[in-house]
DNA sequence: ACAACTTGGAAACATTTTGGTTACAAAGAA
DNA sequence: TTCTTTGTAACCAAAATGTTTCCAAGTTGT
């Protein structure tokens, strides 16, 4: 599917409309994340970088355009398509001046929506951020951040590289020599036995404090493995 | 007038519609060039570089979308808005797939047209004003001035360039090598470790003396990031 | 099963790396 | 010159990483 990895966020309080939107967009291969209100969206944006948003103007609580206006001020620049049942001129203007890129009135023609989505994505140059996912973990290689179960987890540089090499080689016991070459580099002389152990344990504790997820397990006499 | 020097080409065979379009766009300060057919447009494009085109689908001789399709193949990439009297779905699709960015049906609302023109110009990177905004900050690229929360803040040249590169790449950790290339230039030999640190701290102190806004935060082991 | 041995984990501590602060010097502009 | 901007150096603080020690758990041979 060609639209893989392009993420689209929808905020729409009418559940059936939301489902319809999700259906059509997913059929085109987009990754769709739907919300029934602006709640939680801000948190979501901190973790993911959607390429486009489709937002109902008429939302419970915050107005849709009000929300986008705030979002723009915070520095988010992805294209936004507003949806509205109304068709008043003043509303239209407000939508555009608050940072909207396009405007469609409900009921909308699904084909047209898809065409407008595609046109906007093309025009704005899609920035698919480099992300690697594994189970509950999302490693953003560009932002150098990790989220586990949606919650951000602070990693040091070393820990980040370490986890990255494990995610690149899952289900495989990586021995200490390999890790040393890969993460620390060949130039590291005087390498202590326990250096890797300690680093691994610090990493394990950060990504799974309770130890219940067992992301990384020791392989006795070899090294460690990511499950 | 703020839209000065932005040139818009219109191709529309109905003379009264063309005049109406020219009137509204000129009132907004755009430079408008109208054509009654696709004839002569190609020649015009070789001499001028309009920022946007508004094209009727239903033209005598060549179809409007056919013309744009050829134009795209020749390498022209400016945004295009199609106008049409018809409202058939197949036409709509053809318009978008042949390189259109937006689509309006006649009779159109002039206000909406202007809004869509402005939105497309913004999205395609043509700045109607040489100002960049980020959160509370407004960077005037022409005047080389900055205001934070509406209050003017004096920046030196170096600081201005530095902040500008951060605003161009928000939410992303910029490492020291990148900053060095971008702001100081590759030719700088004998570059001291701490040069960037000191420059960054001077900048941070100027745009956020109390440190409470946290515009720019260090990313340990990498560089700095604008939030 | 048991002791002897090997390996991994935990915690405390030490070292190194990195960023922040300040003062001052050099370079450049008015 | 005089003022401003920018770079350098020295020093401090914070964070990351490495080392050591001790203990727990797994392995092996008897």
Image (cartoon, coloured by chain):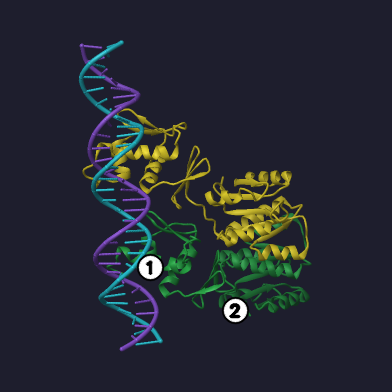
Chain colours: A yellow, B green, C cyan, D purple
Where residue B82 appears, as percent x and y from the top left, is 69, 65
Residue visible at 32% across and 44% down in the picture: A183
Tell me whether circle 1 and circle 2 mark residues in contact (CB < 8 Å). no
Q: Is there any visible trace of residue B166 in the rendered image?
A: yes
What residue is disc 1 on? B199
Task: Tell whether B166 sits left or right of B56.
Answer: left
**Whole-Å distance between the Cαs marked 1 and 2?**
36 Å
Where residue A171 appears, as percent x and y from the top left, is 41, 33
B95 relative to B161, above or below: above
B144 relative to A180, above or below: below
Q: Is there any visible trace of residue B182 in the rendered image?
A: no
Quarter-of-image position of residue B5: bottom right
Residue visible at 77% across and 61% down in the picture: B86
Depth order, front residue of A37/B93: A37
Quarter-of-image position of residue A77: bottom right
Q: To which chain does the residue with label 1 belong?
A: B
What residue is disc 2 on? B5
């Amino acid at each position: 599917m060609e639209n893989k990895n392009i993420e689209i966020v929808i905020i729409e309080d009418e559940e059936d409309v939301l489902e319809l939107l999700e259906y059509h967009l997913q059929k085109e291969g987009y990754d769709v994340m739907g919300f029934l209100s602006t709640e939680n969206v801000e948190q979501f944006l901190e973790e993911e970088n959607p390429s486009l948003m489709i937002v109902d103007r008429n939302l419970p609580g915050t107005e849709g355009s009000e929300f986008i206006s705030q979002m723009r001020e915070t520095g988010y620049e992805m294209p936004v398509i507003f949806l509205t049942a109304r068709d008043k001129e003043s509303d239209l203007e407000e939508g555009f001046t608050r940072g909207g890129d396009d405007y469609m009135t409900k009921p909308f023609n699904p084909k047209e929506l898809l065409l407008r989505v595609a046109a906007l994505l093309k025009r704005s140059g899609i920035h698919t951020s480099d992300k690697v996912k594994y189970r509950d973990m999302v490693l953003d290689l560009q932002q150098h951040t990790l989220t586990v179960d949606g919650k951000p987890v602070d990693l040091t540089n070393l820990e980040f590289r370490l986890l990255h090499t494990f995610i690149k080689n899952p289900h495989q016991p990586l021995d200490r020599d390999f890790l040393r070459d890969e993460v620390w580099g060949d130039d590291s002389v005087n390498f202590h036995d326990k250096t890797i152990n300690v680093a691994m344990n610090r990493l394990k504790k950060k990504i799974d404090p309770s130890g219940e997820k067992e992301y990384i397990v020791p392989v006795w006499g070899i090294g460690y493995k990511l499950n």
